[in-house]
Amino acid sequence: MATTPIKFMDVRFINPFIVSLVSIFKEMAGIPMEKGTLVKGQGRKLFSGYGVAIGIVGDVNGQVLYEFPENFSQLLTESLTDKKRSDYDSEDEFEDMMRSVINEMGNTISGLAITKLSEEGISCDITPPILYYGKEIQIIPKNLQTIIIPFQSNIGFVSVNIAMDA
């Protein structure tokens, strides 16, 4: 158990997700990410594109939602696979690959963040990722305080949304 209770917006909980996203994008895709200004909100709707939701259980309970706009998802997939969308045998084949890439990025970032939390004495596990696609889908319930962390790169933007149960 964590020795000091974790509170909402506690940097010990937020920073591992920031550091992990920046690290994974740089190491896996060679894409530098620049963090924007954190915003506090209530819940979170998937704005448009892909979302990967992962639950967190343990010393801290909550949910993380990674948002990937469709254009960003396409460019990331092309970068990681070294194949353009038009190089795939079918649109379905590319869409399957894109879903796989996005899901794996969310899972990998969360796995590294959980490892970093453990190094800080915060014991947590993650649930399997759930992939969403669409517009205006309420992913994080409105009753949960949420920290929205935007990131910008040369291929577009993504965001990490972190909600903790009180």
Image (tube, grey):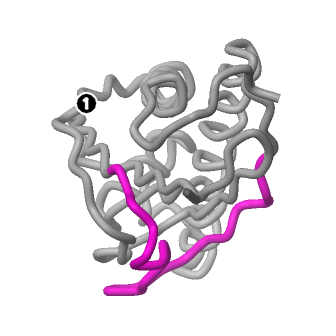
For this orientation, the residue located farthest to the front is 4
Quick check: can you spot residue 52?
yes
**Apparent side of residue 135 relative to residue 91 in the rendered image (left or right):** left
Quick check: can you spot residue 74?
no
Give the camera-side residue of 100 and 64. 64
Principal SS element in the magenta part?
strand
**Label 1 amino acid?**
Lys
Give the camera-side residue of 155 and 125. 125
Residue depicted at x 63% and y 58%: 103
Q: In which quarter of the image is residue 67?
A: bottom left
Q: What stretch is highlighted in magenta?
A: 126-147
- Please provide percent x and percent y for residue 121: 75, 17
Disc 1 target residue: 35
Q: In which quarter of the image is residue 81?
A: top right
- Please provide percent x and percent y for residue 155: 25, 43
Residue depicted at x 46% and y 51%: 162
- Please provide percent x and percent y for residue 52: 56, 63
- Please provide percent x and percent y for residue 24: 54, 27
Residue depicted at x 46% and y 33%: 14
Q: In which quarter of the image is residue 54?
A: bottom right
Q: Is residue 96 above or below residue 55?
A: below
Q: Is residue 40 above or below residue 111?
A: below
For this orientation, the residue located farthest to the top is 119
**Apparent side of residue 1 relative to residue 12 in the rendered image (left or right):** right
Q: In this view, does 131 lie above or below 109?
A: below
